Structures are given as structure tokens and as C-alpha cells.
Image (cartoon, rainbow, N blue to C red):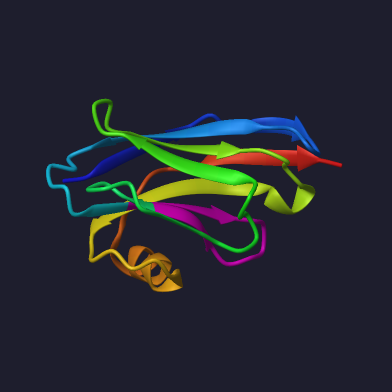
Amino acid sequence: EEQLVESGGGLVQTGGSLRLSCAASGLAYNDYVIGWFRQAPGKDREGVSCISKRDGRTYYADSVKGRFTISIDNAKNTVYLQMNGLKPMDTGVYYCAADRIPWVASSLTFQRLLEFGSWGQGTQVTVSS
């Protein structure tokens, strides 16, 4: 059974940076895909980025391309989300999710994780203007 624990959130000013971590256990197979999502108050949960455990292929939502970088350390079973150039619109609770699904570099992967993924408890990110 997958277990995911997010950390690294906090309060930062516009233009600042944060690095989120998702410590994962139970991901015994290389065909896992791990994704980062966020949810702002009153809004739906949206996909931010995802990565293939097998080969590190990545996909980003248009809203974060060029600012966020996802990476994986398989030795530590941890997925990171480096967030630079933060904006108030990036405020929300950030979650990671994982599932054994085929890799597709598109929003379809976000949809599959939303439906079938295992989730962490989330970490709050607040960007002040």
C-alpha cells in the first residue's frame, strides 16, 4: 500500500522560492507515476506536475512551466517540487499522488491520478503579494 507524506510548505513573498518534498513508501514497482497537485480555497484540485518513477520523464501544467521543477530521488523514495518565481496565484494546499499508470505526457495523467491515485495529507503554500 502506498503512503505519501508531503512537507516543505510555508509562507513566502512574491518572487520567492520553496522546495516541497513527497516522501513515498510502498512504491515497489518502477511503473509508478507521481504527481503534484494543488487546491486553492473554493477551487478544484488541479495538476501541477508529474514524473515517471521509471525514467524521470516529466510533465508540467502551463501555469508553472519555466518556474517549477519536479525531480525524483529513487534511493530516498522522495519526489521534489522546486518552486521558483512564486506568485499569489500559486497559493494553496499542495498534495502528491501516486499510482501505477501508463506514462502519458499530458493532462490525462493528472486525470488518472485524481481518480485512482493514493494521496498524501497535503502541505500549505501561501504566497503573499
Is 99 on the left-hand or right-hand side of 42? left
Q: Residue at x 42, y 65 (%)?
A: 110
Q: Residue at x 78, y 37 (%)?
A: 15
Please say whether residue 4 is one of the residues in the magenta stretch. Answer: no
* Image spot of residue 3 (x, y percent): 26, 41
* Image spot of residue 106 (x, y percent): 43, 70
Residue 110 vs 126, above or below: the answer is below
Q: Quadrant of residue 80?
A: top left
* Image spot of residue 124 (x, y percent): 60, 39
Q: Quadrant of the C terminus?
A: top right
Our reading of the magenta stretch's main secondary structure is strand
Residue 9 shows up from this direction: no
Residue 48 vs 67, above or below: the answer is below
Is 65 on the left-hand or right-hand side of 97? right
Please say whether residue 46 is one of the residues in the magenta stretch. Answer: yes
Residue range in magenta is 34-50
Q: Residue at x 64, y 46 (%)?
A: 67
Outermost residue on the top side: it is: 76
Is 111 or 45 nearer to us in this picture?
111
* Image spot of residue 73 (x, y percent): 32, 31
